[in-house]
Amino acid sequence: LLVEREAKLLELMSEAEEYINSIEKSELRMMFEFYYIDDLTWYQVAIQMNRAFPKRKIKYTEDNCRMRHQKGSLIQTVFFINSSENY
């Protein structure tokens, strides 16, 4: 049972990484990777995004990272919900 669950989780992780890599907008792709793959909080995502884009006029915040994720990622959110339901 444990081996089956581990295999399923590895499969889901692989699917998630593949999907994230297919996101065209690099900023959104990075946010997804930080949040879903690296398991960072939205606050930590904002810090990483500000490090990646130091010349950006409007700095990333916890709230605007979360909002960009929600606004630009309805399809991605559905993907992750469906994947986790299969677990």
Image (tube, rainbow, N blue to C red):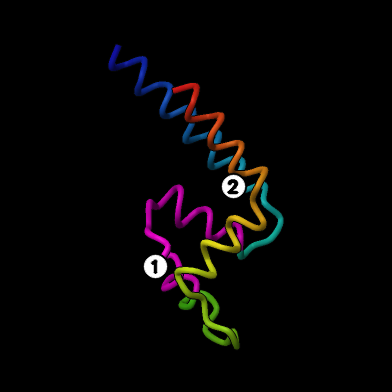
For the N terminus, give its image quadrant.
Answer: top left
Q: In screen coordinates, is 80 left or right of 73?
A: left
> Which residue is labeled 1 in the image?
43
At 39% from the left and 67% from the top, the residue drawn is 43
Mark closest to the chain's N terminus, 2 or 1: 2
Query: Image height check: is 35 above or below 82?
Result: below
Q: Position of residue 15 (x, y in %)?
A: 55, 34
> Which residue is labeled 2 in the image?
20
Q: Secondary structure at mark 1?
A: helix
Q: Which mark is residue 22?
A: none
Q: Position of residue 10 (x, y in %)?
A: 42, 29
In the rendered image, the residue lying farthest to the top is: 1
Instruction: Report the Cα–Cα distance between label 2 and label 1.
Output: 20 Å
Residue type, label 1: Tyr
Q: Which residues are magenta?
A: 28-49
Q: Secondary structure at mark 2?
A: helix
At 41% from the left and 28% from the top, the residue drawn is 9
* Pick the front one: 6 or 40: 40
Q: Residue 31 lies in magenta, yes or no?
A: yes
At 49% from the left and 21% from the top, the residue drawn is 86
Residue type, label 2: Ile
Q: Position of residue 16 (x, y in %)?
A: 54, 39
At 49% from the left and 69% from the top, the residue drawn is 63
Q: Residue 42 lies in magenta, yes or no?
A: yes
Quarter where residue 26 is shown: bottom right
Quarter where residue 5 is shown: top left
In the rendered image, the residue lying farthest to the left is: 2
Callout in the foreground (2, 1):
1
Q: Main secondary structure of the magenta part?
A: helix
